[in-house]
Every structure is written in structure tokens, then in C-alpha cells.
Image (tube, helix red, strand yellow):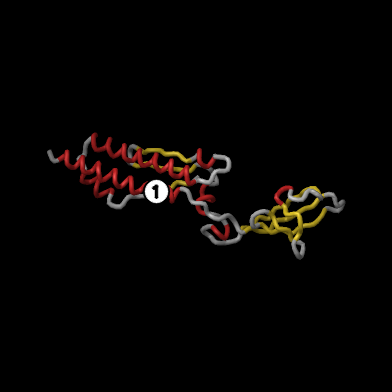
Amino acid sequence: MISVHMEIEGLADLMSKLPDDSKSDAVVKRIIDRAGMRTVHAAQSHAPRRTGNLQRGIVYTFDEGAMEGRVTAQANYAAYVEFGTGLYGPKHERIDVGHAMRWPVGASGVGGFAADSGPGGTVRLTGTHTAAFGRSLSGSEGYAFAMSTAGMQPQPFMAPAWEDVQGDIAADLASAAEQLIGSGED
């Protein structure tokens, strides 16, 4: 799960200038709700689609007490998609996967294995995996022990969503503030 916390500079100062009444709270809540839903739609449009699970799991919630909205990507792998993994992720390190795989001999391409082996007893798997390989004693099965992977490049969807909507949010806030501050001076 990934939750992105974004702030608008000067919002606290603006809020302090608004009249302290239910009308102001309702207007601010409506703006936050609109901003949250815009961010959800933008994030869903930026999210890579394979099964649709990532997109369906992007949701908006509002906390009345804190007067803040939160857009969350609930898929357990969302952070890996947003920030990448391995060499491409925050740690910039190869990932040791260390697991064995096997497949029937003669089934080239099954399980994502390349049909031909590389030099020195290695086979190239799909993506950036490298593995040691061989055959079972009977010769009927091939096997590979994946040692490490370079990882997955980031495919950001939350940060670009915020970039897409922040100008609209600022404009909505400025317009509402002008109306509320103006109406509070009567």
C-alpha cells in the first residue's frame, strides 16, 4: 500500500484568514473532496494496467477531524510500481532472489526461459534475471537457480497525478478564499 502526502504551500495561512464557521468548513471540505477525486482519477489514468487491480485500489478518504483528504493506492505492490525495485529503486542494489525453477526439457520458452543458454552455464530469463541452469539426472527436466535480478524500473502514477491536479486545486482554493474572505467582511 502507498499513501502520498502532498501539501499546498500557504494553505495553513489561508485557512487562518477564513471565517471560522460551518460555511467555510463546508467550502474547504468540498474543495478537498474535489481535489481528492481529481487526484484519484489522474492516478488511475497514470497507473500501468495489467489486471486493473492497481487502478481499482486507488481510493480517496477524508478525515473530518483533521480536515484532510488522503489518496491511497491499496495494492500491496503499489510502492514497488511507483518507486521501482533493485537497481532502479530507492536502494539502487541488485535483488538476490535465490529460488529454483524447473521446466520440461524441449519446452523452450515455457516459464519465461529463453530457448538457448548463454556462456558458462547461465540462461537469460525474461526481464533482467540471470540464473545458473542444468538438467535433472534423468534429463527430462531443466532447472535454473535464479541468483539475482536488476529489479523493475519505476512506473510512477501517484506523483504525476499530483503534478496534474495541483494547479486546479490552487485555483479552486484561491477562488473559494476570495469568496469567503470577501463574504466575511460584510
Name the residue carrying label 1.
164
Question: 62 left or right of 111?
Answer: left
Name the residue: 52% across, 42% down: 54
Total tally of numbered discs in the picture: 1
Depth order, front residue of 60/1: 60
Question: 148 left or right of 73?
Answer: right
Residue 60, x across and y down, in percent: 42, 39
Name the residue: 54% across, 51% down: 80
Quarter of the picture holding the C terminus? top left
The image shows residue 43, relative to residue 119, as above or below, that is above
SS label for mark 1: helix
Question: 122 left or right of 72?
Answer: right
Instruction: In the displayed orientation, state which residue is furthest to the left.
Output: 186
Instruction: In the displayed orientation, state which residue is furthest to the right.
Output: 138
Q: Amino acid at mark 1?
A: Asp
Name the residue: 72% across, 48% down: 111
Residue 19, x across and y down, in percent: 20, 40
The image shows residue 186, relative to residue 8, as above or below, that is above
Circle 1 packing at 10 Å, graded few (<14), some (14-19), many (20+), is some
Name the residue: 43% across, 50% down: 160
Depth order, front residue of 37/15: 37
Q: Quadrant of residue 169?
A: top left
Residue 18, x across and y down, in percent: 21, 43
